[in-house]
Image (cartoon, rainbow, N blue to C red):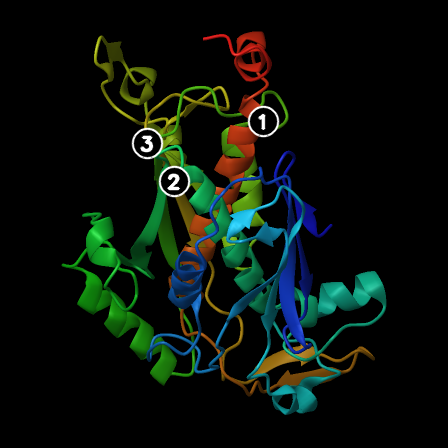
Amino acid sequence: MNTFGVALRISTFGESHGEGIGCVIDGLPAGLKIDENFIESMMKRRAPGLNRFSTQRKEADKVQILSGVFEGVSSGTPICLWIANTSSKSSDYDNIKDIFRPGHADFTYFKKYGLRDYRGGGRSSARESAARVAAGAIAKLLLQEFNIQVRSGICSIGDVVGSEFDFEYAKNSEIYALDKQKEDAQKALIESAKNKHNSVGGVALIEASGLPVGLGEPLYHKLDGAIAEALMGLNAVKAVEIGDGILSSTQYGNEHNDEMDKKGFKTNHSGGILGGISNGNIVRVKAHFKPTPSIFLPQDTLDVNGKQQVCKIKGRHDPCVAVRGSVVAESMVALVIADMLLLHSTSQLSFLKKVYLGEL
């Protein structure tokens, strides 16, 4: 499946070493101002080759709007976004075209489809996530109309775990670190892994504020369920936490429950979601990224004929995919919330009457 969303539907296309990648956005209301400078700013945050902490594959990632926008405003028709691949080096993969790279989708794609694009993994490459960020930028423009903000940053790299979360600081950090006291140690860990021809995992924190009460579609399209599904759909994400997450399993009821008074909720252990519906609190999500599987160390594997081989990877790869992955995770959360916002508009008869009868 290459499409997600219900009211706001996103279909992505393209491969890592093809002509380019892109997406089609369907269901966006007409009349939204499409700020191309904002889209570009989001793409730059995810862009490869920014510094020594990311892959040195340099892509312009210029988003070209092919349809659905007229005179800078959404027309209500499908929006098609195109991003050309300008820096692919397919020859880097010639030596492993018949070999399954450990930690990658090579083996499973080959067994499922009977063939695979060995050039960087083709469709399974994280290169596809650039299209998600482009779509996420448009979702964020929609959310801004309702004063909803989604932001992200890195809270941990390997075993270096931050305890302070400053999203303003993260904007100017080379690794989007949320805790400035831990940033140097987190950078050192990434560089150490890189210098050893290895990689390291990390955790991104995503927060969404300004949500109205009521977003989420129980029972089978709950807000937290949709967020978890969207984030688990990212290549390197292996776990998702909402609110206190796994800590909840160690707590007692009186520790985890968010009590209320006339001012609202006293705490936010639930992460802003109850019963799959937003409760007006900040939605707080963590996405756990595994280490980048492309490492420059010899690894035992098999080839397409089942023969034992040693995999020796070439190319340009992120020493910590969580850093740029945090921007992708932020984009996915924005897309889910935008979808839920549109779905919620028909939850009550009174909502429809406001639209069609002008009733207040």
Give the distance between the C-alpha atoms of the residues marked 1 and 3, in whole angstroms.
20 Å
Sequence-wise first label, 2 or 3: 2
Image quadrant where residue 243 sits: top left
Q: Who is closer to the viewer here, 58 or 134? A: 134
Using the image, determine if residue 252 lies above or below residue 147.
Answer: above
- Mark 2 lies on a secondary structure that is helix
Asked if the residue under mark 3 is in contact with the one under mark 1, i.e. CB atoms within 8 Å, the reply is no
For residue 282, the mark is 3
Residue 108 position within the rendered picture, expressed as x and y whole percent measured from the top left: 73, 63
Residue lying at the far right of the rendered structure: 114
Q: Residue at x 30, y 56 (%)?
A: 156
Q: Is residue 333 visible?
A: no
Give the distance between the C-alpha atoms of the residues marked 2 and 3, in whole angstroms.
15 Å
Q: Residue at x 29, y 61 (%)?
A: 176
Which one is closest to the eye, mark 2 or mark 3? 2
Q: Amino acid at mark 1?
A: Leu
Q: Residue at x 44, y 64 (%)?
A: 43
Q: Amino acid at mark 3?
A: Ile
Q: Residue at x 43, y 77 (%)?
A: 198
- Give the residue at mark 2: 144
> The C terminus appears in which quarter of the rendering?
top left
Residue 283 position within the rendered picture, expressed as x and y whole percent measured from the top left: 37, 33
- Give the residue at mark 1: 343
For residue 104, the mark is none
Image quadrant where residue 355 sits: top right
**Around disc 3, counting alpha carbons within 10 Å, would you say few (fewer than 14), some (14 to 19), or many (20 or more)?**
many
Using the image, determine if residue 118 lies above or below residue 180.
Answer: below
Q: Is residue 102 visible?
A: yes
Q: Who is closer to the viewer here, 114 or 130? A: 130
Left or right relative to 191: residue 124: right
Using the image, determine if residue 261 lies above or below residue 281.
Answer: above
